Amino acid sequence: MSLIKRNGSLFPRLLLNDFFDNNALTIPSMFDLDDTFQRLGFATKVPSVNITESNEEYSIQLAAPGLEKKDFKIEVENDMLTISSHKEQETNEEKGNYRRREFSYKSFSRSFQLPQNSQTDKIDAHYQDGILKLTLPKKEVSLPAPKKEISVN
């Protein structure tokens, strides 16, 4: 996946200073599937995410309209939170002398490295109005002992 936006052009815009870089004349590959699918309008849709932090918890809000609660799979393994969904839909219609069959597949997966002070056993998830909201409470972190001066006898 490329993190450089190319403004819809096959060739990136080059500046004079770019010629002094090692990768200045690198042309994007015609076979870069992520980039090619995005230009053609077939890009994989990854839900937008808002992450906020308060003194008590972390909050993750994932925009996933058109799904149901049962469509989500949320897993935590080795401090990695993974939210995924896979939905298949098929429609069959037969009238007279024709038959129409439509199907669609929607899936995504997002992973987040959790901070060490999050309580992974108390994650709460709610889905309402197209927004999946996860709440991750923080662990109480013990403060380091204050500096103590010891006198020499």
Image: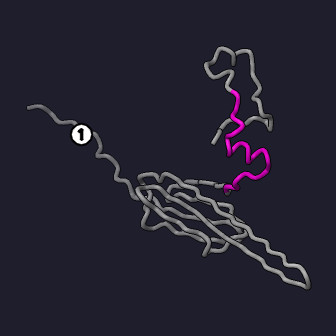
Is the residue 47 above or below the residue 146 in the image? Answer: below
Numbered disc 1: secondary structure:
loop
Q: Quadrant of the C terminus?
A: top left
Answer left or right for 152 relative to 33. left
Q: Residue at x 73, y 69 (%)?
A: 66
- The residue closer to the viewer here, 24 or 3, is 24
Give me the residue at 50% from left, 58% from top.
81
Residue 46, quarter of picture:
bottom right
Q: Residue at x 64, y 62 (%)?
A: 107
Residue 68 placement: quadrant: bottom right
Going by the numbered disc 1, the residue's amino acid type is: Lys
Q: Residue 113: image x %, image y %?
A: 49, 51
Q: Which residues are magenta?
A: 27-46
Which residue occupies the extreme front position in the image?
97
Instruction: Verify whether residue 11 appears in magenta.
Output: no
**Front-most of 100 and 110?**
100
* Residue carrying label 1: 148
Q: Is 134 located above or below residue 24 in the figure?
A: below
Q: Quadrant of residue 94?
A: bottom right
User: What main secondary structure does the magenta stretch of the protein show?
Assistant: loop
User: Is disc 1 surrounded by few (<14), some (14 to 19) or many (20+) residues within 10 Å?
Assistant: few
